[in-house]
Image: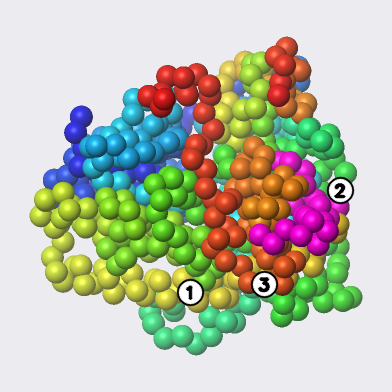
Amino acid sequence: MTTRGFAIHFDGRPVTAAPGQSVAAALWAAGVRSWRTTRVSGAPRGLFCGVGACFDCLVTIDGVPNQRACLVPARPNQAVTTQIGTGGDRTGSTGS
Amino acid sequence: MRYDVAVVGAGPAGLAAAVTAARAGCQVVLLEAAPQFGGQFWRHRGEPGAHHRPWVGLAALRAELLARKVAYAVDAAVWFVERVDAGYRLLVTGREPVVAPRLIIATGTYDRVLPFPGWDLPGVLTPAAAQALHLAGVAPGGRVVIAGAGPYLLSVAANLLAAGVEVAGVYEAGDPRRYARRPGAVVAGKLAEAAGYVAWLARHRVPYRTRHAVVAARGTAAVTSVEVAKLDRRGRPVPGSRRVVACDALAVGYGFTPRLELPLALGCATRLDVDGNLVLDVDIAGRTSVPGVYAAGEVTGVGGTELALIEGRLVGAVVSGASGRPNPFTELELTRMLNRRASYRRLAHLAHAAHAPPAEWMSWLEPRTVVCRCEEVSAGQIQAAVTDLGATEPRTVAGLCGAGMGWCQGRICGYATATLTAHLCGRALTSADLLPFARRPIATPVTLDELARSPLK
């Protein structure tokens, strides 16, 4: 199996990902532990359940908020950005 | 395509059921939400290989599945099920609906968690998440604490050690001595396996403590240490036993929670299992209370991979008979499988007793500890809903303070909110307490586009 890495972007900086890794795994490998702040207290959140059940790892990927970083595969040149609250502000939508 | 049976979930139980039914000549369709076969137990990256434990069973089942030309789809999450004239219609993400006269539910579990102060800090994750990182070639941390309850913790610790990760300690809340001296080869085999892991930890000088729990995590941007305490018989920290263990990751879980969205949407009867889980009430043939709906594996009671495989084969045979196909097993084989199932079920009961979640885990909470991670509802708010506002059951608590009503729809805090509410009301947990947090007619979140394209009116 090839393990040649490729670059994704997290909040504008390059992060190396390997084929078959989720966005969460790639961020974790780069030392990133949180990529969302909560709606009420603004607390940092990142990976928790790892299997798509908890929705703690929600993140904005290529402008689309509320994606589960533990499920979405890392792909070359993805733009991953920290999600603030509902993520509505980032896309210009009204949120909810 | 006309199918005899649709199998939902391609973990050990679903794979075994699909292969068995196909062997008997049934037209089978197998639907899996993940991008690969194998479920949580056989989770792998790329072709399963050197960095994975016994995947031989998976390879054999997968090979037979392909050889028998079983229809299957991965990345295919069933998000809605309903009764139609021809049986059951399944709505599947990104695909056409699937209709079949019979269903086999084999949707498995995810890790069960209990709240404690600091459990919402980044770097605190479930054993499954730590395992997923490990399989992706990523260390969960530089120095990892593993805690919770169940034999699973030992295998996660061994995997991380083998990958060169420093494991700061393994803290088992249960009391494995409760396996006691029970007769039976199955129990003996499992005990030998656990003893092997414990010896492996000792060789690596990793502390393994039983009747201990992580009762708090500390840090600001991420976890930097945890507080470990000895537990008394009711699961409360023994005064003076707290000590701090430095770490940059904590993997913590207390068993597993079955995924029951689809059978509950169809009205299948449930019961409270010995491990405090809501599970499907099935008969010896794997039939639920709803005609044509069968279940196998962890959704009928958490019991491990071997049990799931046996149940999958049995239910595959039962469905074959119901579909007018010959039974693929001889009477002797069936008898042997029923006996083995009984042995593994006994082992599961022993394991649940030895690794039960601490009864008074809520003694670890502070009023401001988050219980519902999505809606950021604190233990104090839940307490107020019961003691000040008079709620007597979890559904009312959820309505009053929002616990279990966020993105995860109670998947994560459902057990905690239900047991905390029952405790505050001074009564034992019932299946009715857990039901509101397990019932989700839309089984997995879908986009509005998906909803608009669906045949739902």
Which residue carries the number 2 mark?
Answer: B219
Q: Are tags 3 and 1 found on a single chain?
A: yes
The one of B143 and B172 positioned closer to us in this rendering: B172
The image position of residue B147, as x and y in percent, is 69, 61
Determine whether B251 is above or below B6 in the image. Answer: below
In the visual, does B180 lie left or right of B105?
Answer: right
| Helix, strand or loop for disc 1 | helix
**What residue is drawn where x is 27% and y is 70%?**
B338
* Residue density around tag 2, few if under 14, some if 14–19, many if 20 or more, within 10 Å: some
**What residue is drawn where x is 43% and y is 28%?**
B93
* Residue density around tag 3, few if under 14, some if 14–19, many if 20 or more, within 10 Å: few
Residue bounds of the magenta highlight: B368-393
| Foreground tag (3 vs 2) | 3
Determine whether B201 is above or below B343 in the image. Answer: above
The image position of residue B48, as x and y in percent, is 42, 43
Q: CA distance from mark 3 to mark 2?
A: 35 Å
